[in-house]
Image (tube, rainbow, N blue to C red):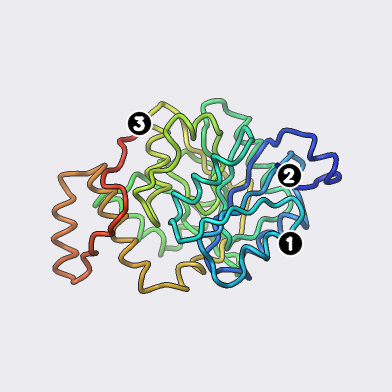
Amino acid sequence: MAFVSFVSLSATRLLTPIVSIIIVSFNARADLERCLESIYASPPAAATEIIVVDNGSTDGSADTARRRPGVRVIDAGVNLGFARANNIGIRAGESTNILLLNSDTIVPAGAIDRMLAELDRDTDVAVVGPRLVDGAGRAELSFGRMIGPLNEFRQKRLARSAAVEHLTRQRQYPDWVSGACLLVTRQDAEAVGLLDERYFLYTEDVDFCAAIRARGRRILFTPAAEVTHLRGRSRATVADAMNPAYRRSQLAFYEKHHPAWAPVLRAYLRLKGDNPPEEPGRPGRARRPGRP
């Protein structure tokens, strides 16, 4: 396994990595290149390995990643979705901590080290999420309460409000943080069986955090680290296919966590003409929180 160079590539190869950076790529070559460049331009002080899992891109994303020294590329061959591809990367890593990182992010100098410092600061914390901002520096509401009928409505209202700037300046312990940039200890990730692969796209991060919280561990949002999130480039390339994938994940989440509400959600989507067809070949049952 090759590690990213922070002092020199040869010296870093001798170290056991502190953090594995897992980047899932799907037809977002320019974003992936920009993300990797940001890490290489200002590398963390901690020994790090980078693993890119390419979900069958046709735009040369995998080749772009291979040109970077120290990056390991795993070709999935097809679009496996976010959860399953991340799990492949996690299993391939050797570190004590895991950073799930979207390809459409830009990581400033010191951000990863500050996240690691927050993880070390409180032994009850298993997951750390940074403050996410868009390309213009506007804050994203990248954490929240457990998804449910009322909380989804509340989250959408908050995300469109002026309160986002204030909320994202406060260190706090939410129910979940965004999987766009999520640091977790390997021990905690493995204890819950990694990400639930029933979720192709969206809600897998909320479910993952719920499983970790079910074990008595804490989720931390910290404004001490800030990462730019350009949002949705991979999704934009196949927008027509992604909406049904999102709805399947949403339904799977409700079936797992709010089974009484799942028929209501399905009926609502049917009335809207937005009820997704079943996807053949996907796992049929989601895990309960805390169970592998």
Q: How many residues crowd around disc 1 within 10 Å: few (fewer than 14), some, or many (20 or more)? A: few
Q: Point out residue 205 in the picture as x, y percentages from the top left corner.
A: 43, 47
Residue at the image point whose x is 33% and y is 67% from the top: 243
Q: Nearer the viewer, residue 170 or 234?
A: 234
Q: Which residue is mark 2?
A: 2
Q: Is residue 170 above or below residue 248?
A: above
Q: Secondary structure at mark 2?
A: loop
Q: Nearer the viewer, residue 57 or 138?
A: 57
- Of labels 3 and 2, earlier in sequence is 2
Asked whether, in this view, residue 92 is left or right of residue 235, the answer is right
Residue at the image point whose x is 51% and y is 63% from the top: 56
Residue at the image point whose x is 69% and y is 44% from the top: 49
Inspect the image, locate mark 2, and give the three-letter code of the amino acid beneath it: Ala
In three-dimensional space, the C-alpha distance between marks 1 and 2, rounded to whole angstroms, equals 13 Å
Total marks in image: 3
Inspect the image, locate mark 1, and give the three-letter code of the amino acid beneath it: Arg
Q: Point out residue 187 in the picture as x, y percentages from the top left corner.
A: 53, 29
Residue at the image point whose x is 66% and y is 56% from the top: 107
Q: Which residue is mark 3?
A: 291
Q: Secondary structure at mark 3?
A: loop
Q: Nearer the viewer, mark 1 or mark 3?
A: 1
Q: Is residue 198 above or below residue 216?
A: below
Q: Nearer the viewer, mark 3 or mark 2?
A: 2
In three-dimensional space, the C-alpha distance between marks 3 and 2, rounded to whole angstroms, equals 32 Å
Q: Point out residue 238 in the picture as x, y percentages from the top left corner.
A: 43, 72
Q: Is residue 153 visible?
A: no
Asked whether, in this view, residue 139 is left or right of residue 239, the answer is right
In three-dimensional space, the C-alpha distance between marks 1 and 3, rounded to whole angstroms, equals 39 Å
Q: How many residues crowd around disc 2 within 10 Å: few (fewer than 14), some, or many (20 or more)? A: some
- Give the numbered dot on residue 67: 1
